[in-house]
Amino acid sequence: MKTKHDTQRRTQQTKERLKKKELEYQRDLQRYNEILAKGVENDIPPKRAKCKRRSRRRVVKKIQPPPNHPKRPQYSSLGSSEKTPKQSYSPSTDLPPHLQETTTKSFENKVQLKHTYPELLKIINQNLSSNTIDIPLIHNLAPKNLEYESKRFSIPADFYNSTVELPNYSDANEIDFFFAETLKSDLSLV
């Protein structure tokens, strides 16, 4: 809570501050008048008059092409002009050898279209030591379970007789009737 004594003290402090500011202002004003009385403003040099700059003339340089001097003839012996151009490659190193000349056998040369799956596996296992087989071939080709594969794709004999495995067509008779009618309406080609 503010007391009466606190508010009086604050008002007294603000009055003192205002007195100090007023005294500083009076001192500054007195000092300024003393300087003006001495005629100090005459010591300030006059401002220089602004002169117009002369516009600079542009010097246009003509662009000239470089001088074309005729080339001096190069004297060379007659033997050097008769040389044949050198080949840019040597056929022995750059071209692959002919298939008839190759003696190395790779996996691709051994595999034929008539091989069965077990025969292919046998050939791969024989060539595992050489680097002619791809790594994916080594890892992905495993012996097939032929019995399982044959059972997987075989259709049992009683498949069409059992009603459990057939889908439930409620409109099967209507479909048969539709196809019978379309066959009757078609004209015979004979």
Image (spheres, rainbow, N blue to C red):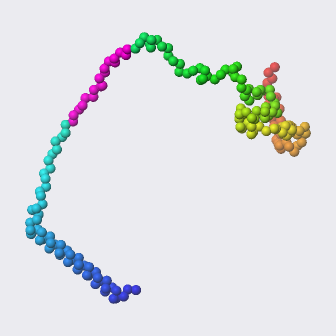
Q: Main secondary structure of the magenta part?
A: loop
Tell me where residue 88 appears, x and y as whole percent.
53, 21
Quarter of the figure with the N terminus: bottom left
Of residues 65 and 94, the one nearer the viewer is 94
Residue shown at 26% from the left, 79% from the top: 17
In the rendered view, does 29 fall on the left or right side of 135?
left
Residue shown at 48% from the left, 13% from the top: 83
Of residues 134 and 46, the one nearer the viewer is 134
Above or below 60: residue 22: below
Quarter of the figure with the C terminus: top right
Residue shown at 12% from the left, 69% from the top: 35
Identify the image quadrant of residue 39: bottom left
Residue 117 visible to the viewer: no
Tally the marks. Answer: 0
Residue shown at 38% from the left, 86% from the top: 2
Please report the bounds of the magenta region as a residue range: 58-75
Residue 91 visible to the viewer: yes
Tell me where residue 86 appears, x and y as whole percent.
51, 18
Tell me where residue 37 appears, x and y as whole percent.
9, 69
Identify the image quadrant of residue 74: top left
Magenta highlight on residue 62: yes
In the rendered view, does 47 fall on the left or right side of 162?
left
In the rendered view, does 32 fall on the left or right side of 79?
left
Magenta highlight on residue 141: no
Of residues 65 and 166, the one nearer the viewer is 65
Of residues 137 and 48, the one nearer the viewer is 137
